[in-house]
Image (tube, rainbow, N blue to C red):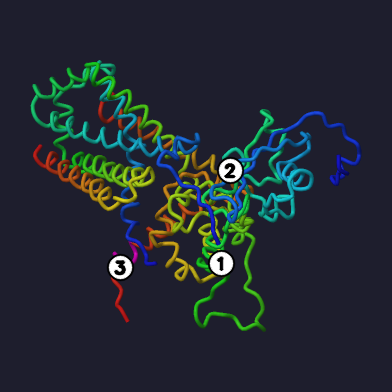
Amino acid sequence: MSKSNEPVLWFLFSAGGMISAMVFPILLIITGVILPFELAGEVTFERIHNAVKNPVVKLVLFFVIALPFFHWAHRFRFTLIDIGLKPISFLVSLLCYGGAITGTIVAAFILWKI
Amino acid sequence: MTTYRKPVSNTWWLESKPYFLFVIREFTSLFVAGYCLFLLLFIAKAGDSQEAYATLILSLKSPTSMVFHLISFTFILYHAITWFNLTPKIMVFHLGEERIPNALIAGAVYLSWGVVSLIISWLILGS
Amino acid sequence: MATRRTCLWKRGVKVSETFEMEIFRYYPDKDNEPFIKSYEVPFRDDWVVLDAINYIKDEIDGTLSYRWSCRMGVCGSCGMMVNSVPKLTCSAFLKDYPSRKIRVEPLQGFPVERDLIFDMDDFMNKLTEVKPYLLRKEGEEKPLEEGEYLQSPAELAHYKQYTLCINCMLCYAACPIYALDSNFVGPAAIALAQRYNLDSRDQGRNQRQEVIASHEGIWECTFVGECSVVCPKDVDPAAAIQRAKVSSTLDWFKEKMIPRSKG
């Protein structure tokens, strides 16, 4: 047996799990109800637009999106393996982490372009 | 010696409630990824133009968006609660011979959840 | 009827109610497949599942094979699946099953040798793999005449919980990951490794990490958490594994980020 490189994946999984648990519920309330139905008064386009153009906000958003992608990848990989896809575990890992890496690149690209 | 090994079916997680809840907990990750994609869409539109953003906000009132948000919220809330409840298992602190009680650590985690949520609301929505 | 050997029986306690026991039977030289056999036993308020099984062995069917010893939740021998839940049968009361019927099977995830007896060699090998004894670095072993390694009560508190394991294997039976892949080192063995890793007198963590930090060690665990739920001694092996993940992750970053000269 040799030491596994799993720690780096587990670290990304944990960080993404913590971030999504902490911030996604309130974000869902905001994008799902508060913004469309103006429950907190009018939030102007300029306010949101300027916010996402701010480099610090961009950096924060990058981690808030990229890490939860890796959270998904790691968790979903093990879920699929546990429920019977162990024979193709390499392919499962490839698709899951590949998906997360793609998501991260897309996120970086979108934030860069703004 | 001949032995008998009970085969494990791929539906083992449907055979007991704790296993089922475990798999549900693991499947919440799908909704986490789904909401990541939505956030990317939101950021792209908000960074684009007033028209694009207005169209997006309008589409958020649609039943499709409501259902997406409601289902995602349910699963992500389940993820958050199970995640926070398990946190004290990992964060173990001792003060002399006494272990700091799980409830205290969980309480601190839930409190920071509340504070973070308030800060985010304030940052996005303003006063 | 034959003379009852059970002492309570002798006292002439009136028994009118019965309890149905469905028992997993398997005799490898005779049966190709295991089967379930049903037995009717008297129902007594103060009987545990093990009492009912002993009654079957003594009064109904002497061929039934199972392990037990202390009947007081210490030896860890009498673990069985009761209605698909791993239990110490000496601590599971009949009265807690109001349907008056249970199914008893050998602990899940292990190869069955006969009836309720399973092969525990795999578990025993795993226990020795994690080196569950105090290890000192080379040259740091105190000579005998210098006496024992001292430890404060606060240092004891860091690992004491993990010393309470009685090796009953209920945690393995509760673990779907172990059932799916018996290469997984598993809950009790990892908790035992942590018991020594967290002991201030021990210096053997690096040696144990070869097994613990491997893929078949902690990294196969997906924190189902049932091992801790069924543990009769509140050892909380699930937490032990997660804590080992945290410390192994710190190790990994230290090893990869801080380059060390090889020599």
Q: Give the left or right position of residue B122, taking residue B40 as reference.
A: right
Spot occupied by residue C174 in the image (x, y as percentages of width and height): 53, 46
Spot occupied by residue C249 in the image (x, y as percentages of width and height): 37, 58
Spot occupied by residue C169 in the image (x, y as percentages of width and height): 58, 53
Q: Residue at x 13, y 20 (%)?
A: B54
Q: Earlier in the sequence, mark 3 or mark 1?
A: 1
Figure label count? 3
Q: Is residue B67 magenta?
A: no
Secondary-structure class at tag 3: loop
State whether the magenta stretch is mostly helix, strand or loop.
Answer: helix
Camera-nearest residue between C161 and C89: C89
Q: Which residues are magenta?
A: C253-258
What label sits on residue C158 in the rendered view? none
Between marks 2 and 3 in the image, the one whose residue lies nearer the viewer: 2
Residue A62 in sight in this render: yes
Q: Amino acid at mark 2?
A: Phe
Spot occupied by residue C96 in the image (x, y as percentages of width and height): 69, 33
Q: Earlier in the sequence, mark 2 or mark 3?
A: 2
Q: Residue at x 53, y 75 (%)?
A: C136
Q: Amino acid at mark 3?
A: Ile
Answer yes or no: do the residues labelled 2 and 1 have beta carbons within 8 Å?
no
What label sits on residue C35 in the rendered view? 2
* Label 3 chain ID: C
* Label 1 chain ID: C
Between marks 3 and 1 in the image, the one whose residue lies nearer the viewer: 1
- Which residue is label 3 attached to? C258
Where's the C terminus of chain C, which quadrant?
Answer: bottom left
Q: Give the left or right position of residue C25, taking residue C214 as reference.
A: right
On whether disc 2 and disc 3 are found on a single subunit, the reply is yes
What label sits on residue C132 in the rendered view? 1
Q: Residue at x 27, y 37 (%)?
A: B33
